[in-house]
Image (cartoon, rainbow, N blue to C red):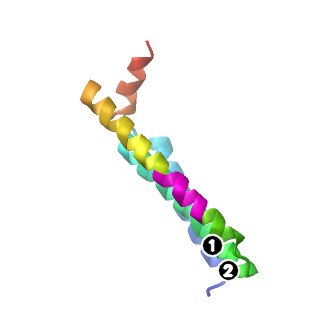
Amino acid sequence: MPDSWIVLSLCSVIFFIGLFGVLVRRNVLILMMCIELMLNAVNLTFVAYARQLGDLSGQMAVFFIITVAAAEAAVGLGLVVALYRTLRTVDTDDIRLLRG
């Protein structure tokens, strides 16, 4: 396995790419993909630490994060479909108009 700092550097780069996408983009689908990218960076970090320490608890945490991410994707895509049927757009600026 490569040095742990290389893996952690890759994880941090992937996480910050996802964070940049969440902060900059306006499309809800792209926001959801960026959140998934951030979750996968955290998963990779957990797996790297679990392998480095020889412990399975990090891999069990990854299992739960993947489960939560799948539920988030299912609920999020359902909301996106409902919003698109109502507004005919998935732009976050237009969705803010629903506040009142």
Q: Nearer the viewer, residue 14 or 58?
A: 58
- Residue 72 visible somewhere in the drawing: yes
The span shown in magenta is 63-70
Left or right placement of residue 80 versus residue 16 in this view: left
Contact (Cβ within 8 Å) of mark 1 with mark 2: yes
Q: Which residue is drawn at 62% across and 86% down?
A: 2
Q: From where the camera sits, is residue 27 visible?
A: no
**59 with respect to 72 (left or right):** right
Seen at 43% across and 42% down, the residue is 75
Residue 32 drawn above or below residue 57: above
- Tell me, for residue 51, which label it has, or none: 2
The residue wearing badge 1 is 47
CA separation in Å, label 1 and label 2: 6 Å
Q: How crowded is mark 1: few (under 14 residues within 10 Å), some or many (20 or more)?
A: many
Residue 69 part of the magenta-drawn span: yes
Viewport quadrant of the N terminus:
bottom right
Q: As displayed, is residue 86 above or below residue 34?
A: above
Q: What element carries label 2?
A: helix
Residue 58, percent across and down? 68, 69
Numbered disc 1: secondary structure: helix
**Percent coordinates x, y for residue 40 in the rendering:** 53, 62
Residue lying at 28% horizontally and 25% vertically, measured from the top left: 86
- Residue 73: x percent and y percent? 43, 48
User: Which amino acid type is shown beneath numbered disc 1?
Assistant: Val
- Secondary structure character of the magenta stretch overall: helix
